[in-house]
Amino acid sequence: MDRFEKRAIALALSLVLMFFGLIVYAAKGLQADLPTCLPYKREIKQGAFQEIGPNRYQVDVVAFMWGFDMGQINTIRIPRGAIVDFYVTSRDVMHGYHIDKTLVNLMAIPGAITYSRVKFDRPGEYQIICHEYCGLGHQNMAGKVIVE
Ligand SMILES: [Cu+2]
């Protein structure tokens, strides 16, 4: 084998190891809450907004053409410092679920549930939008989280 080939192979392997190490570092060291896909563990038929403990909330989101059902509502009101679990699915086509000023950026996939947890430390209004083009009414898909 040519010595340049050996170098190229060594370089490629070290890059793979480096990127793998960075993923592990992001997940463990930085505790980045990577979005998780939870197919078939739960079934969400309709949206729901529940208080599940002191300053803890759970939101089941069903995206549809063209809106978000979070328990017949598209605006959530929570107190400052609330920790909210979002479970997102879709009843028709693929949508997106992005909450402004947070790391929530989930896909709404029919037959699967995506999940993210957020702590809302700052009071204010957080816009929710669909970030995956889903058809004619795409731009009408909106919601809001109001932190009081
Ligand atoms: Cu859309």
Image (spheres, helix red, strand yellow):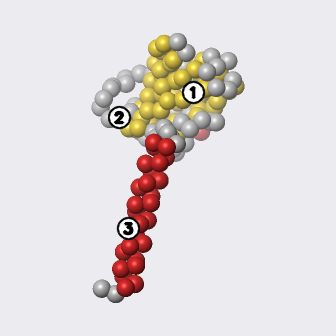
Label 3: state its secondary structure: helix
Q: Is mark 3 within 8 Å of ligand 1?
A: no
Quote the CA–CA distance across marks 2 and 1. Answer: 21 Å
Q: Is residue 106 visible?
A: no
The residue where tag 3 is placed is 13
Q: Position of residue 53 (x, y in %)?
A: 48, 13
Q: Quickly name the residue at label 2.
A: 38
Closest to the camera, between mark 3 and mark 2, is 3
- Mark 3 crowd level (few <14, some 14–19, many ≥20, 10 Å Cα): few
Callout 1 touching callout 3 (CB < 8 Å)? no
Mark 1 lies on residue: 119
31 or 103, which is in the foreground? 31
From what the image shows, is residue 12 above or below residue 140? below
Q: Which mark is residue 82?
A: none
Of residues 2 and 116, the one drawn nearer to the viewer in this rendering: 2
Q: Is residue 79 left or right of residue 92?
A: right
Of the numbered discs 2 and 1, the one sitting upstream in the chain is 2
**Label 1 to label 3, Cα distance in Å?**
39 Å
Whether ligand 1 has any atom under 8 Å from the Cβ at mark 2 is answered as: no
Most foreground residue, 58 or 65: 58
Quarter of the image with the C terminus in it: top right
Residue drawn at x 64%, y 36% is 101
Q: Given this view, does label 2 or label 1 mark the residue nearer the observer?
A: 1
- Say which amino acid is labelled 3: Leu
How far is the residue under mark 3 from the one under mark 2? 32 Å
Sequence-earlier tag: 1 or 3: 3
Q: Position of residue 98 (x, y in %)?
A: 55, 37
Please say if 5 is above or below 124. Answer: below
Task: Pick the quarter of the image with the N terminus.
Answer: bottom left
Name, please, the residue furthest toward the bottom: 2
